[in-house]
Structure formats: structure tokens, C-alpha cells
Image (cartoon, helix red, strand yellow):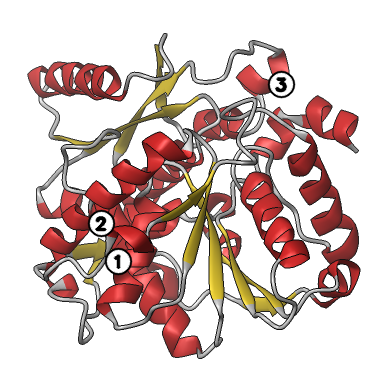
Amino acid sequence: MSKTDTLARPDRAPGAPGLGCLDDFPRVRFFDAPTPVERLTRLEAALGAGPILVKRDDCQPLAFGGNKTRQLEFYFGAAQAQGSDAVLITGATQSNYCRLAAAFAAKLGMDCHIQLEARVPRSDPAYKRSGNVLLFEMLGATLYDYPHGEDEAGADARLEEIADDLRRNGKTPYVVHLGPGHPPLGALGYAVAAREILEDGLGADEIVVSSGSGATHAGLLTGLRALGDRTPVHGICVRRDAERQRPRLIERCGEIADLMGIPNPVRPEDVIVDDRFLAPGYGRMNPPTAEAIQLAARLEGLLLDPVYTAKSFAGLVDRARTGPGDKTRLYIHTGGLPALFAYADDVREAL
């Protein structure tokens, strides 16, 4: 049996003091933790900043990697435990989540049904056919269109309708829901990542991460606080403004703690969100995003995507420029690189 075959089996998430019963959750693993951490010394010099570290969750091996790998380990673990032979998921046209779900399904011999939401007001060929969309097709997923972009409940309801059709045809589907009101299993992946960060002994004074669905941000924050660590986690808004994102995260942290079987260790004041780099909206470029793409690429050979990582990296750059110069900052690179090709014209114009 090869190493890949061994890793592809359902496994158990390792438990640890302060992380409750994470070891009770089924988990499918396709990468060896921890992911690499590197220091961005040329960026530090350009900004006159203290140490800047980047945790390379974009370096996971399956289908271009990214933060959704950690989340899908738990969803596919649950799907296999339930004997499912098909998985359903919903996301934006260039969804990294959907791309990795299709890759997990291919590795495990499951069908994948992807619903694509109209979150970004564009229909150019590169956006509609390149990037992640090309990868969906290569990975063998069945695609559906959903005409709305800000209707999480409706998108989840439509997934359930598709799942009912599959059941009538003899399939056993598993639905990865988008909106609140469902156990945030995927967020457990970043509670595990929190332990990984502390075991690495990086000594970060603050952490910067994209804040979209909230699973990565809330999972990381809950995991750190459960382990007794008080490092501030700055979530840079990439989908909704801070007024709407903050209560979503507070609720999600409580749900994660419930899943882990522990009292909620996150206080409301722990939830930090910054929406200054969001406009004009989800999946749309702005000057700080363009600068972040250029700085990361030309100083460090680090590639960012316009939707998530460039916006959160813009937040990191701002904090490094304006904050105390002796702080060590850790940036979580959540991947999403195939979207670069869907936004090729936007990136060229920005550069």
C-alpha cells in the first residue's frame, strides 16, 4: 500500500488538551501537517516592519491546496462514516471550496455535485470558463447554476432538492451546507491548525487571515483560545462588511465550542474584523488588493488571488506599515490560486 493510499483512509483527528473531543470526529487526510512557514524578509525591509511570517496552507498537495482542505477533511470524514457515495456543495462561480470538494470526491471514488452561485456580476469567458471552473470539469463534477449570490438559505435549500433527486435515483448524498444553522464541522480543521501554529513555536504577536464564510477565522480563533493562547486574530473581510461579519463570527465560535464539547472560550472582544479592503465587494479588485498582489509577487515570489488572499494580505501590509515595528506578524495564506487565471485581465490592468 502506498503512502497516498494510507492517507486516503478515514482517520481520526488527533486530540489535545483544551480541544475537547476532536479525536471523536471522523476525518479524511490527504496532506502531512504542519504546512510550511516562511519569513518575508524583503517585504519587511520594504515596509520597515518587524518579522512577517506566512503559513503556507496554499502548499497542500491536492488540486492546488488551500484552506478548504483542512475543512473538507471533516466533512468527507462524516460523509464516509454515513456511507455516502455523493457529495453536494455550493459556492461562487470560482469557488475554491467546490474545487477541493471535487478533488476529494475524485480521490475517494464519490460523485460530486457543485452548485455555482452568481455572487460576482460578470460573465466574461475567463471568469465563466477558466480557473476553478475548468478544474471542476477536469475533476468530473456535475455543475448546476443558482441565479442568486447572497441567498445562503436559498442555496442550501436548492442543494437539498438536488439531494432528494439523487436519493430517488438510489444514491446516498451528503450535503455540505453554506449558511448558518448547520454544525460547522469544517471549522474544526482550523482548531487543529491553531494547535499546529502553537506547536511550531512561532511567537507571533498577531495573526492575519481572510474572513469570508467565517469557518477558517472562527475555527482558528476558537482553537487558540481553547488552548489558552490570547494572540489577536485579525480577520480581513472579503465577503461582507464588519457590521454583518462580526455577529456571524461570534455565533460561529459558539457553535464550534459546542461541537468540541467545551465552554465557549471566545469573548466578544476577541472577534476582530476589518472591512477597509472589501470595497467594491466580493470578488472585485481595488487599489490595496492590486498593490498586495504586486508586493507579494515581486518581493517574495508569493502569489495571491484577487478574491481572498490579496485582500487579507492588503490588511497585513497596512498593519505592518502603521503598527509597531517590533511585532511579529503571522499571515495565513489560504490559497485560491486558480482564480488568478479567471481574473487575468483584472490582474494585468492592476499591474
Question: Label 1 sits on what residue type?
Answer: Thr
Q: Are marks 1 and 3 in contact (CB under 8 Å)?
A: no
Q: Give the residue drawn at x 23%, y 37%.
A: 180
- Depth check, front residue: 299 or 167: 299
Image-based side of 263 in relation to 200, left or right: left
Q: Which of the two discs, 3 and 2, sits closer to the camera?
A: 2
- Depth check, front residue: 27 or 270: 270
Earlier sequence position, callout 3 versus callout 2: 3
Can residue 97 be seen here? The reply is yes
As helix, strand or loop, the secondary structure at mark 2 comes to helix
Mark drawn on residue 40: none
Mark drawn on residue 253: 2
Earlier sequence position, callout 1 versus callout 3: 3
- Depth check, front residue: 87 or 34: 34
Q: Please, is residue 313 above or below residue 321 in the view?
A: above
Q: Give the residue drawn at x 48%, y 78%.
A: 34
Q: Give the residue drawn at x 38%, y 35%.
A: 244
Q: Are marks 1 and 2 in contact (CB under 8 Å)?
A: yes
Q: Give the residue drawn at x 39%, y 40%.
A: 245
Gap between marks 1 and 2, in whole Å? 6 Å
Question: Label 3 sits on what residue type?
Answer: Ala
Image quarter for residue 289?
Answer: top right
Where in the figure is residue 202, as x and y percent of width and height?
56, 86
Q: Which of the two discs, 1 and 3, sits closer to the camera?
A: 1
In the picture of the structure, the residue carrying the numbered disc 3 is 126
As helix, strand or loop, the secondary structure at mark 3 comes to helix
Image-based side of 185 in relation to 148, left or right: left
For label 1, count other residues whose C-alpha is less than 10 Å away and answer few (under 14), some (14-19) or many (20+): many
Gap between marks 3 and 2, in whole Å? 37 Å
Gap between marks 1 and 3, in whole Å? 38 Å
In the picture of the structure, the residue carrying the numbered disc 1 is 222
